[in-house]
Amino acid sequence: MTSLSISAPSGSRLLRSGFLLPAILVAIVAILVVAPLLRILFTTLTPEGIAAWKAVLASPLSANLWWRPLLNTMILGFSVGGGCLLIGGFLAWLVVLTDVPGRRFLGLMASLPYMIPSFAAALAWGTLFRNSRLGGSAGFFETSGLAIPDWLAWGLIPTAIVLIAHYYSLAYTIIAAALSSVGADLVEAGQMAGAKRPRIFFGIILPVVTPALIAAASLTFAGAVANFAAPALLGLPVRMQTLSTRLFGMIETGQNERGFVLALLLIAVSALFLWLSDRIVSGRKAFITVTGKGGRTKRFPLGAWRWPLFAVAVVIGFLTTVLPVLVLAASSLAPQSGALFSNWTLHFWIGEGGGEMAQGQAGIFRNPVLIDAIWNTIRLGLVVAFTTMLLGLGLAYTIVQRRGSLLATLLSQLAFLPLLVPSIAFAAAYIALFGAPIGPLPSLYGTFALLVIAASAHNLPFAVQSGRSVLGQISADIEESARLTGAGLTRRLFAIIFPLAIRGLFAGAILVFVKMVRDLSLVVLLFTATSPVLSMVAYRYAAEGFMQFANAITLVILVVCLAASFVAHSLQNRVQKWKAQ
Amino acid sequence: MNALATGAADAIKIRSLVKRFGAFTAVKDVNISVPAGSFLVLVGPSGCGKSTLLRMLAGLESPSEGEIAFVGQTVSSGAGGVIADAGKRNAGLVFQSYALWPHMTVAGNIAWPLKVARWPRDKREQRVREVLSLLGIDTLAERYPAEISGGQQQRVAIARTIAPQPSILLFDEPLSNLDAKLRIEMRSELMRIHRATGATSVYVTHDQVEAMTMATHVAVLNNGRVEQFGKPIDLLRNPQTTFVATFLGTPPANLIPVRRAGDGLVFNDMMLAPAALAAGRDEAQLLYRAEDVSVGAVAGAPSLMARFAEAAPIAGRTMVTAMVGDLRVTAMADNYFTATPGEAIPLSFIRTPDAVFAATGERIQQ
């Protein structure tokens, strides 16, 4: 080490930055991830905390506080995981392994629902299926004379359906990627052995993609367990509680300790299942890395089933992407929420307040809170996208450079910790840490800064992953050949690394932006009137029964997300001209 | 299945075979037959249609025209498509990528085709042990493909293919992913296995050395057509086209373009051969082996000056490459020879040309 630093001309600077960057990163990760989790744990170990543990786990209240929400959460998790596996797997099989017509189109349709916030589907469901049991205006079907039973209007079943409609596209993406890595050679080798199609499917294809199936099931399970919007909108009105809605309720009513206990339990449940699935997948059988050559995949002829199966896939895509958006749009124009297609008005968008409609409230674009929220949301998305990608790049660089060292292992483990923590529980941890002043620092609760910090921390796993994939595209040779010309670190960074990395960074940043704009479960606890964001405003309107306003705002969120994706797409092609289309 | 008699029961008989992909014709009118136990090598540059031909033999592609018969049974034809499925042809294919099933152990990979073929358990286990030891990989039985080296994966792929005792073995550039030393080792290994199994083999490669060393029959393919088919030594001695003449043989042979001047064939104002060789044509190409061209002036032999390019020692002599204008000429020098690149050296044509070709590429028979 010493001899090296002597021979290098800028040795002292190198040496300093060599320690400085990792030290800063460790400190940041510790504050962002470890501190809140430790804090929430310690808060529940105080006398009040112990009492909360008892109340939640072993008291007459515990059935309501813990066991029933746990049961609901588990039912939701398993049904969503299973449903997503079936639908996502079916679509992935259809698109990747068969000669179904319009494969690109179907693939695009299947990947869209994940771009739409889960509360959009929940709101659309309510708009269609809401019945009059709880008072308020009935939904489209009941108004049209179709009696909707309670089980279809509220509770577990609609929540599960809405969550499946949202998360199946995540399962699709994972399974489709795995299926397209099954080389045609593997299949043809089976054909040469004389195996028939079912035998090849069950004997070769299915086992090879099993790790991906498990990953898809566990990630959609974790997503459903952590989701707040759908159970809150479709379950809370009939007092169906999941762990996340219970946790929200506790903190909102000031019972912070009980909320923290529930947050810890929710983390434990979610982490346990993710860990279990990881155990099954890893080890000697982690063969996902072995792939065929050239990425050629074998497509099986469907014969007479081509068009019927195409129709099934189109219907699935239509019901989960186009229909919800249409319903929300129609509802935002209809004065009576049940009569979707009559007396359309722009009142909920641009109407002036004071009239008879909507209890005198003005349309959303005349509402100063909403205008505020739009800017806040975009600002939040941009700032978090920037901080996340910056942190991710720094962490990934350090982890790759010091591969194998204790520091790298520590950093990568810590950075992936938030993956195990449902976002609403993470928000609870941030309240535990920053809810009160720390020393000279004021309480951050309700500030924009807290939202940014919490969101950056929550996105760390994604950031590191995309940082690594970005750096992975820049081979060590390229950097070293630049180094041999005598270019310094800064010069290399701006002339070589940055231009090559920009596309990946940009794609990652857009994804973070979209995730933030449509996020509800993280901001729902951290939001206050001083820092409103769109998703929260929409949720508030929905909770108060102003469905048209909620639906209109959800459409605004959708437009922002789609616009971001579009901008990203058109910019990407311009940023790196040397890449073939 | 109706057996369509094709006369003498060649192990493999390919007749007028054509394969089109849309407007592109990958295989054009191929006719090849080989007797049982042969080792047929399909050799040619990449994109010449050799892999497509092999996939049609395997039953993974159907021909557009013509037919393929195994031991007198038509297995594919332009009219009937794939008549016998890939699995029903009693043929095995070794893939270039090995195509080992990653979720099965080495033993599992070898046993699976036997399971599909409903071999009883004890016979199956015995056969797996047999092929494992035939390929010298007994110790790897319980490993997963990802846990063994490329050369070992290659052996497993071969073991898996020969386990069901197919009467026809197909190889798709099986050695192209191995390093040079391992390639030579596996070459002899494959020939040993060919002798041990007695299966008729079809082997696709772009490496002419593999073709010359392993084959009993060689088909040289170019642009989807068979340029020449026969025994390797015949192809080497009597190439019928300039493509075959320059593609086969180490070091590569020289083709010298000449024109008729008086009663001689002339290159750069120097007479190389009598005009009679060109059979009345004004232009021709003369084939000289590297050993027919010597470095240095030789009394009585036509010689010309060339610019030295590179030298490589081979078996006690030196292969010298030099440029005459834009023409690259390979010659042999005794002992070790070297010169400065660009230096002028004399080359002598010490023997008569081995063959004469028309300017369009076909052989002029003498």
Image (spheres, rainbow, N blue to C red):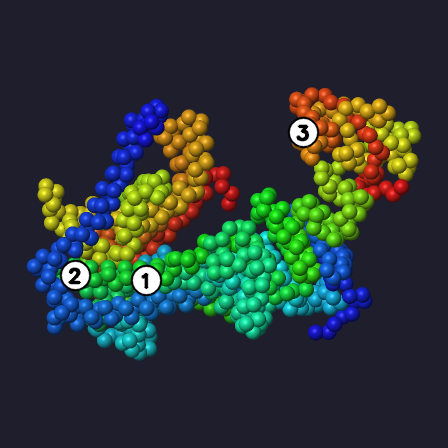
Q: CA distance from mark 3 to mark 1?
A: 63 Å
Q: Quadrant of residue A407?
A: top left
Which mark's residue is nearer the viewer, 1 or 2?
1
Residue positioned 13% across, 58% down in the render: A44
Where in the figure is residue A141, as x and y percent of width and height? 33, 73
Q: Which residue is mark 1?
A: A276
Residue B312 percent coordinates (x, y): 66, 31
Let me know if marks 3 and 1 both belong to one chain.
Answer: no
Total marks shown come to: 3
Which residue occupies the foreground of this view, A458 or A135? A458
Q: Residue at x 91, y 28 (%)?
A: B262
- The image shows residue A416, relative to residue A17, as above or below, that is below
Decide if residue A23 is on the left or right side of residue B242: left
Badge number at residue B301: none
Q: Crowdedness of circle 3 by 10 Å Cα count: few (<14), some, many (20+)?
A: many
Q: Of circles 2 and 3, which is in front?
A: 3
Marked residue nearer the N-terminal end (1 or 2): 2
Residue at 64% across, 54% down: B190
Instruction: Work out whether disc 2 and disc 3 sit on a shared chain.
Output: no
